[in-house]
Amino acid sequence: MRLWPFRRRRKPVEPVVERVTADDLARMAQQGELARAVVTPPPAPRASADRVRSTVAQLPGRPLGGSGVATQAAPARQRAAAVLVLDDEQRVTVSGGGLVGRDPASAHPDGGYAHVIALEDPERLLSRTHLEFGFGAEGSFWVLDAASANGVELHRPGHQAATLVPSQRTTVQPGDTVVFGGHTLRAEPAVGLVDEGPLG
């Protein structure tokens, strides 16, 4: 039987830290053993508040706390607009929410709508407030049946006429015709956008 010789584990070698003093650095620098000497400059003294104010006052056109760049006025915000074609004759440009009916102003005396459109009602089919309209966040035009007595229908080419659910918004696409109370409404895109302004 062969016995393997016992091997001792070697103790790890600890690194030797050399201490270099200022005298060692001076000697090495004289002998050219140092390529360069890095000197850390002392911290600069803090300026007094009076000195900071006087320095800022000498800067032309740069107020304290400003960037010195003239700020331009922001462009006027714009909102979506559409041209409502009523009964193929009356054209109304709208750029906000509104009401359509026999007498919507009396039904909503508090206002709050950009447009209030009153239509004649010879056949007595219109409610005082028959239809409400507005624009979605992405600029789409919508209508809803304002709980009218005779309802609202949407006619879309290639589809059957659909009766709108009261108080539920329905997006009106180009080519659609909204039929309500003996009247019709089509929404055409307005040319450009309308500047944002106070409702009126």
Image (cartoon, rainbow, N blue to C red):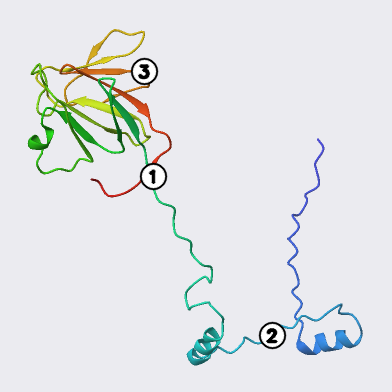
**x, y percent for residue 189:** 39, 29
Residue located at (76% from left, 72% from top): 16
Q: Mark 1, residues whose alpha carbon is within 10 Å: few (<14), some, or many (≥20)? A: few
Question: Mark 1 sits on what residue?
Answer: 78
Question: Which mark, by number, is residue 41?
Answer: 2
Q: Which quadrant of the figure contains the C terminus?
A: top left
Distance CA(mark 3)–CA(mark 1): 25 Å
Is residue 134 shown left or right of residue 146?
Answer: right
Between label 2 and label 3, give the one nearer the viewer: 3
Please report whichever mark, 2 or 3, sits nearer to the chain's N-terminal start. 2
Secondary element type, mark 2? loop
Distance CA(mark 2)–CA(mark 1): 58 Å
Question: Mark 3 sits on what residue?
Answer: 175
Instruction: Give the quarter of the image for residue 59.
Output: bottom right
Residue located at (12% from left, 24% from top): 147
**x, y percent for residue 14:** 73, 66
Circles 2 and 1: CB atoms closer than 8 Å: no
Circles 2 and 3: CB atoms closer than 8 Å: no
